[in-house]
Image: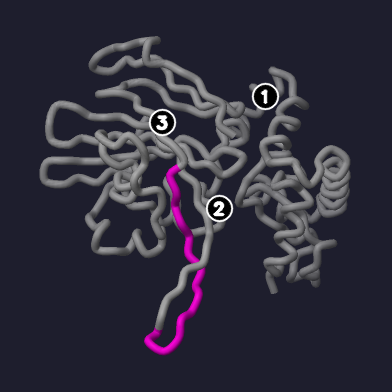
Amino acid sequence: MPFSARTKGRVRKRAWFACCLCKRISMSLEVHHIVPEEDGGPDSEENAAPLCASCHRSFGGNRELRARLREMRDHWYEECARLFDEESTTGDVFHWIHEQFSTEELERLTIHNPSYLSGRDARGGLGDTRFSFCDREYVHPLIVKELLGWLSDTRATIVGVDLEAANRSNRFFGNFSVTEGAEGEVVRWEGDRESFGYRHVATTPSGVEIVECHDWGGGSSVFGTVALFSLEEDRALGSNRQVLKAHRRSVLKTRGQFALGDRYGGNVRYRSGVLEVGPDEGWFRRGEAAAWKLPVL
């Protein structure tokens, strides 16, 4: 039997959503059986260890590391209990972990585990759902386009969509392609005389999804945007004509957006808790005038 949702929740909370081995924060932290089920390992909190997807793949099946894994888990639990209280956030934990490494160690982490500093979730973001901006069941580009709104909007007019319903609705319909670009996968929808594409940049420690978008409306302009999204769960009421029933739904919400300008051609990345928009080397070559940085936790 797998761990219960209650047990998983307790393990993740005790670890402050950080892997007990590499200390990487992940909002989709996996809970691993220290002693496997096939060897009689129980589905108890004592037999559970919080691991990121990378460490789970690398060390989860190593029988020789079982005792050490338990020791490292207990040590990380003790550190979390000592350093963080009820009012702490995953951002506080992220900053503490970041301060423990020297510049040289951070550079090595970047080489061997790019997801640690980029913020990218190894399984594609959006927590434990099957939806993703860069893997599994992709979020349809037209949903992203809808959440961005129109250029004439001064503020967001549509702030959230029921992701499961929208991703399979007739409203957001049409084939899209997934291609490998220089900075990662690009998910693109193309209409008769328009197109819209996005690239997942990173998932921050607090679960904010950073997505680079480009919208072509048929003219010469291609408008770039950096969009911030988050996934939340709530409950909605539905009816079977006899009684109202509540059901869970996953709501993709917009958290903000920043214009890149027409035909932007630079590098957008996230590292060490900072969103960086590099110089524009595109059509208009705005250079450093288009570059900026913003802390996003």
Q: Which residue is mark 1?
A: 106
Task: Say how the picture is coloured.
Answer: one colour
User: How many angstroms separate mark 1 from mark 3 (CA)?
Assistant: 21 Å
Is label 3 or label 2 in front?
A: 2
Q: Is residue 67 above or below residue 283?
A: below
Q: Residue at x 77, y 54 (%)?
A: 49
Identified by mark 2, the residue type is Gly
**Amino acid at dot 3:** Glu
Rendering coords of residue 162 (x, y %): 41, 60
Q: Position of residue 164 (x, y in %)?
A: 41, 62
Mark 1 closeness class: few <14, some 14–19, many ≥20 residues within 10 Å: some
Residue drawn at (68%, 66%) of the image? 5
Determine which residue is flagged by label 3: 183
Q: Which residues are magenta?
A: 240-254
Crowding around mark 3 (Cα neighbors within 10 Å: few <14, some 14 to 19, many 20+) is few
Q: Which mark is residue 127?
A: 2
Q: Is residue 100 left or right of residue 134?
A: right
x then y, percent, for residue 283: 23, 17
Residue 33 place in picture, x, y as percent: 75, 61
Q: CA distance from mark 1 to mark 2?
A: 25 Å
Q: Is residue 179 visible?
A: no
> Circles 1 and 2: CB distance less than 8 Å?
no
Identify the image quadrant of residue 163.
bottom left
Q: Is residue 118 visible?
A: yes
For the C terminus, give its image quadrant.
top right
Identity of the residue drawn at 73% across and 37% down: 93
Instruction: Classify the position of the N terminus by image quarter.
Output: bottom right
Residue 59 or 181: which is nearer the viewer?
181
Which callout, 3 or 2, points at the residue further toward the start of the chain? 2
**Callout 3: SS:** loop
